[in-house]
Image: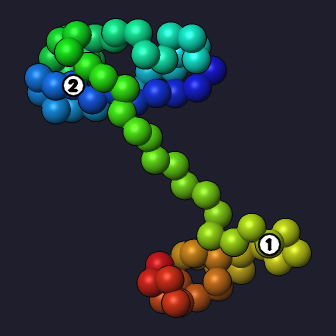
Amino acid sequence: MPIYEYACDDCTETTEARRPMADADKPIACEHCHSTHTRRALSTFLTPASSRSDSPPSGPGCGCGNPHGPCGM
């Protein structure tokens, strides 16, 4: 079941909820102020910097092997 984020129009906090896709746009109460003036927010997620399967990341950071490498990680 996917996790959705909902932005509260009253307190501006974000609430996360694990819900079926069919319920994604149904109203949900804010877990901070309990208002029902919420709307589904765009979520962000992290993916690996490199999709190359022949060389796994060799160190911390972006996967280039240098924590201070070209990506600035």
Numbered circle sitting on residue 28: none
Residue 65, compared with residue 31, is above or below; it is below
| Residue at the (16%, 32%) spot, across then down | 12
Quadrant of res 51: bottom right
Give the amino acid type for the residue marked by disc 2 in the picture. Answer: Cys
**Percent x, y of residue 67:** 52, 84
| Residue occupying the point 47% across, 79% down | 73
Query: Is residue 35 in sight in this rendering?
Result: yes
Mark 1 and mark 2: Cα distance apart in space: 39 Å
Q: Nearer the viewer, residue 37 or 15?
A: 37
How dense is the environment of label 1, judged by Cα within 10 Å: few (below 14), some, or many (20 and up)?
few
Residue 36, image x and y in percent? 22, 10
Q: Assign the N terminus to one quadrant of the image.
A: top right
Relative side of 64 to 30, left or right? right
Q: Position of residue 2 (x, y in %)?
A: 58, 26
Find residue 37 and report its image quarter.
Answer: top left
Compared across the picture, whether 31 is left or right of 51 comes to left
Instruction: Indicate the position of residue 3 as horizontal and vertical percent values.
Output: 52, 27
Q: Is tag 1's residue or tag 2's residue first in the polypeptide sequence?
A: 2
| Residue pointed to by mark 1 | 52
Taking the spot 46% from the left edge, 27% from the top edge, the residue there is: 4
Numbered marks: total? 2
Secondary structure beneath dot 2 equals strand
Q: Secondary structure at mark 1?
A: loop
Residue 47 vertical placement versus 67 (above, below): above
Q: Nearer the viewer, residue 36 or 72?
A: 36
Name which residue type carries label 1: Arg
Q: Residues within 10 Å of mark 2 (few under 14, many from 20)?
A: many
In the image, taking residue 59 as reference, residue 35 lies left or right, namely left
Which residue shows up at 55% across the image and 55% down it?
A: 46
Residue 15 makes an appearance in the image = no
According to the picture, the residue beneath numbered tag 2 turns out to be 8
